[in-house]
Image (spheres, rainbow, N blue to C red):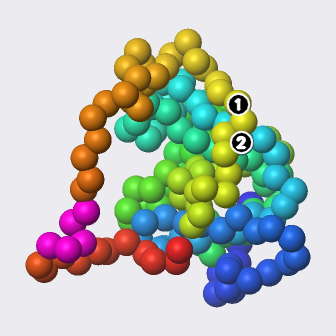
């Protein structure tokens, strides 16, 4: 994990860069191509770490990821660790301890549409209702028009 304290994480090398960070803006990252696979994982550890039915990741060689401030790390098992922002709680990464790759959470990217998952892990742990989400009734929710609304999220995107 490279650190770029004080550097501008948004600028850098040639080719496509994947830039993102946490909600509060304390942690920003940049990962340069080439990237490895992208995936979703339904395992219980990912469900617990995200509070959702799965987590979506894009994997890079760890030496291609630069951090403005390194994330805090929680060892979720004796084999894996997860990076997050201690201020706002945003999950940012997954890594096999000592492994050569790091997986960044797709939705912490400034442009999450730039990566589409290519494979699924631990599908036997997928919650039964996950596959039927697209059939649920929809309702728009936008608080930004409410008087007095203040958004405390970082606006790097």
Callouts 1 and 2 close, C-beta under 8 Å: yes
Residue at (21, 66) in percent of width and height: 143
Query: Crowdedness of circle 1 by 10 Å Cα count: few (<14), some, many (20+)?
Result: few
Q: Which residue is mark 1?
A: 119
Which image quadrant for residue 29?
bottom right
Asked if residue 113 can be seen in this view, the reply is: yes
Q: Nearer the viewer, residue 78 or 58?
A: 58
Query: Crowdedness of circle 2 by 10 Å Cα count: few (<14), some, many (20+)?
Result: many
Q: Earlier in the sequence, mark 1 or mark 2?
A: 2
| Residue 27 among magenta residues | no
In the image, is residue 86 above or below residue 36?
below
Q: Which residue is mark 2?
A: 38
Q: Is residue 35 left or right of residue 148?
A: right
Residue 100: horizontal and vertical position, in percent?
Answer: 83, 45
In the image, is residue 130 above or below residue 137?
above
Q: Which mark is residue 64?
A: none
Residue at (53, 26) in percent of width and height: 42
| Residue 144 among magenta residues | yes
Secondary structure character of the magenta stretch overall: helix
Judged from this view, the residue extending furthest toward the left is 147
Highlighted magenta segment, given as a residue range: 142-146
Asked if residue 96 can be seen in this view, the reply is: no
Residue 113: horizontal and vertical position, in percent?
Answer: 60, 56
Q: Secondary structure at mark 1?
A: strand
In the image, is residue 129 above or below residue 109?
above
Residue 119: horizontal and vertical position, in percent?
Answer: 70, 30
Q: Nearer the viewer, residue 60 or 89?
A: 60
Q: Secondary structure at mark 2?
A: strand
């Amino acid at each position: 994990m490279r650190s770029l304290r004080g550097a501008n994480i948004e600028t850098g090398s040639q080719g496509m860069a994947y830039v993102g960070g946490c909600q509060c803006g304390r942690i920003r990252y940049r990962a340069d191509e080439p990237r490895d696979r992208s995936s979703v994982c339904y395992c219980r550890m990912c469900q617990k770490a995200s509070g959702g039915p799965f987590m979506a990741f894009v994997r890079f060689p760890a030496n291609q990821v630069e951090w403005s401030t390194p994330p805090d790390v929680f060892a979720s098992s004796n084999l894996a660790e997860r990076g997050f922002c201690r201020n706002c709680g945003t999950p940012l990464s997954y890594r096999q301890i000592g492994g050569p790759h790091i997986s960044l959470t797709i939705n912490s990217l400034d442009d999450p549409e730039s990566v589409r998952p290519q494979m699924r892990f631990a599908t036997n742990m997928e919650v039964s209702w996950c596959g039927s989400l697209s059939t649920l009734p929809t309702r728009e929710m936008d608080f930004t028009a409410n008087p007095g609304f203040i958004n405390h999220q970082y606006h790097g995107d």
